[in-house]
Image: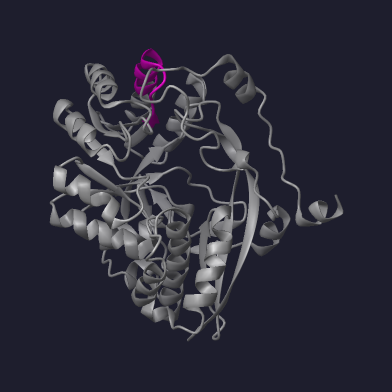
C-alpha cells in the first residue's frame, strides 16, 4: 500500500456551550478545524483533525516526503519529516502539521491491519480512566453545576476547573465542581488549571489558599511553560502535584522538566508531533518514574493511545457527544473511555455535514484562545471586564463565509 495524496477541508461549527479560560474569560461559541484525509492506492483513507493554520504545511510534507511511501513504516516516515524540518526545527506549525500526518498514517496502518488503533499500538486493555474538563470559565455557577452534574451522571469521579482571575470565585467554583462529582465518590479527583496566567509566587499563594479547603490532585500550568525553575519552586511549595507540558511540542522542550525535577505529572498529547511523538514522551517520562496524562483529543481518540502507555494515569475529556462533521467509536462507560473495535482510530468523517460546514478561511474567533495571553498574566489577577462579560452574554454563532461567497464578493 502506498500513499497517493492528501485532501484537507477547513470547517466551522458551533460549540454546545461557551468555552474559555483565564486568557479568554468571555468565552467563544464558534469552533472549527481542519479535516485531513490521506489517500492510498488501495482505497483506504487515513483520518486526522487539526487546525486550519496547518493546511499548507501538511500539503508540503505529504507531497515532498510521504507520497509513495507505505504507511506501515509510519515511525520511519515520522523521522523523515522531522529530518526535513531540521534547520528551523519542528516546533509550532511545523510540528502541528507533522502531528496530523502522523495520526492519519497510524490510522492507515491500523486499517491495513484490520484492527483498532489501540491494538496496533500494542495495548492489551482497551480502556482509559477519564476526567471531566469543562473549559468552563465563561459559565455562571448554575451552568457550571449543570455541566459537571451531567458528567457525574456518566460516572466521572474527577474534574478540572479553569482558575486564575478571581481567587474568591475560584474557591467557590471548585466547591461547585466538588459537590457535583461527590455523587460518585467521597473523594473526587479535583484538578485546577491556570493556563500560565500566574507567576510562580502567585501560584504558590493561590494554590495554598485553595488547598486549605479542598484536596487538590494537581495544579496544571501554574506558571509559564518555559519557567522550569519557577515550576520547581511551585512543585516544592504546594501539596498538589504540578502538571505541565500541554503547550510544549517536542522531546527537547521537555528535557528541562525532567532534568530539573519540575513536574510531578507530564501532560502529553498526539499534538506533540503526533502519536509517534506522544509515545516517545511517555517513554521518556517513564524513564524518570513520572506518570503521564493525555490531554484533550478529537473524538476522545486518545483512549486508543493510553492502553499502550504503562505510566498513563487519566485522560482529559471535554465532550462525550461528537460532531457535527465527524463521529467517534470511543464511548464513556462509568467514567472510563472505551475505544471501539473498528479498524483505525475510530474517527469517521460525515462527508455531507463536512460539505455544509466547509469554509475557505477560519475566523480567529473560531480558534482556541483567540485573544492570546491575556493582559495581567504573571503580574496581577484581572477578572473578566465588563466588556468581556457583555460580549459573552450576547455571543452568537456567526458562520464564516463559504468559498463561493468569498469568490462572489
Whether 162 is among the magenta residues is: yes
Residue situated in front as seen by the camera: 256 or 338: 256
Is residue 110 depicted above or below 276 in this figure? below
Whether residue 85 sits left or right of residue 257 in the image: it is right
Whether residue 299 sits left or right of residue 233 in the image: it is right
Q: Residue furthest right?
A: 408
Is residue 156 depicted above or below 78 in this figure? above
Q: Residue furthest front?
A: 87
**Residue in the picture at 31% in, 69% down:** 121
The region drawn magenta spans 161-175
Quarter-of-image position of residue 193: top left
Image coords of residue 372 (percent x, y) = 50, 35
Decide whether the magenta segment is chiefly helix, strand or loop.
helix
**Residue in the picture at 46% in, 31% down:** 21
Image coords of residue 247 (percent x, y) = 37, 45
Q: How is the image coloured?
A: one colour
**Residue in the picture at 59% in, 40% down:** 15
Q: How many marks?
A: 0
Image coords of residue 48 (percent x, y) = 50, 63
Is residue 250 depicted above or below 379 in this figure? below
Whether 183 is among the magenta residues is: no
Residue 259 seen anywhere in this rendered image of the structure = yes
Residue 45 seen anywhere in this rendered image of the structure = no
**Residue in the picture at 54% in, 53% down:** 51
Quarter-of-image position of residue 305: bottom left
Whether residue 152 sits left or right of residue 363 in the image: it is left
Image coords of residue 3 (percent x, y) = 51, 81
Amino acid at each position: 500500500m502506498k500513499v497517493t495524496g492528501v485532501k484537507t477541508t477547513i470547517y466551522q461549527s458551533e460549540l454546545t456551550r461557551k468555552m474559555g479560560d483565564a486568557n479568554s474569560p468571555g468565552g467563544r461559541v464558534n469552533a472549527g478545524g481542519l479535516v485531513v484525509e490521506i489517500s492510498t492506492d488501495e482505497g483506504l483513507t487515513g483520518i486526522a483533525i487539526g487546525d486550519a493554520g496547518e493546511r499548507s504545511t501538511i500539503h508540503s510534507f505529504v507531497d515532498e516526503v510521504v507520497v509513495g511511501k507505505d504507511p506501515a513504516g509510519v515511525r520511519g516516515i515520522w523521522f523523515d519529516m522531522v529530518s526535513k524540518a531540521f534547520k528551523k526545527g519542528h516546533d509550532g506549525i511545523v510540528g502541528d502539521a507533522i502531528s496530523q500526518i502522523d495520526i492519519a498514517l497510524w490510522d492507515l496502518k491500523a486499517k491495513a491491519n484490520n484492527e483498532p488503533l489501540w491494538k496496533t499500538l500494542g495495548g492489551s486493555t482497551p480502556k482509559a480512566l477519564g476526567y471531566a474538563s469543562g473549559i468552563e470559565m465563561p459559565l455562571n455557577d448554575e451552568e457550571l453545576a449543570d455541566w459537571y452534574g451531567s458528567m457525574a451522571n456518566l460516572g466521572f469521579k474527577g474534574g478540572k476547573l479553569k482558575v486564575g482571575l478571581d481567587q474568591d470565585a475560584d474557591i467557590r467554583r471548585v466547591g461547585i465542581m466538588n459537590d457535583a462529582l461527590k455523587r460518585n465518590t467521597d473523594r473526587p479527583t479535583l484538578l485546577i488549571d491556570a493556563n500560565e496566567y500566574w507567576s510562580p509566587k502567585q501560584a504558590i499563594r493561590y494554590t495554598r489558599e485553595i488547598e486549605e479547603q479542598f484536596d487538590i490532585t494537581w495544579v496544571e500550568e501554574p506558571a509559564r511553560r518555559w519557567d522550569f525553575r519557577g515550576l520547581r519552586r511551585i512543585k516544592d511549595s504546594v501539596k498538589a502535584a504540578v502538571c505541565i507540558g500541554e503547550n510544549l511540542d517536542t522531546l527537547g522542550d521537555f528535557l528541562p522538566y525532567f532534568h530539573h525535577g519540575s513536574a510531578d505529572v507530564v501532560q502529553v498529547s498526539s499534538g506533540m508531533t503526533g502519536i509517534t511523538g506522544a509515545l516517545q514522551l511517555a517513554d521518556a517520562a517513564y524513564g524518570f518514574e513520572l506518570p503521564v496524562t493525555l490531554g484533550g483529543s478529537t473524538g476522545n481518540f486518545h483512549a486508543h493511545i493510553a492502553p499502550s502507555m504503562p505510566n498513563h494515569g487519566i485522560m482529559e475529556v471535554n465532550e462525550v457527544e461528537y460532531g457535527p462533521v465527524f463521529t467517534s467509536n470511543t464511548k464513556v462507560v462509568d467514567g472510563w473511555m472505551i475505544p471501539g473495535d473498528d479498524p483505525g482510530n475510530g474517527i469517521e468523517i460525515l462527508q455531507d455535514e463536512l460539505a455544509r460546514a466547509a469554509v475557505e478561511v477560519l475566523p480567529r474567533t473560531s480558534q482556541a484562545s483567540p485573544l492570546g495571553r491575556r493582559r495581567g498574566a504573571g503580574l496581577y489577577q484581572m477578572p473578566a471586564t465588563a466588556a468581556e462579560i457583555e460580549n459573552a452574554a450576547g455571543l452568537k454563532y456567526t458562520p464564516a463565509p463559504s468559498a463561493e461567497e468569498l469568490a462572489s464578493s
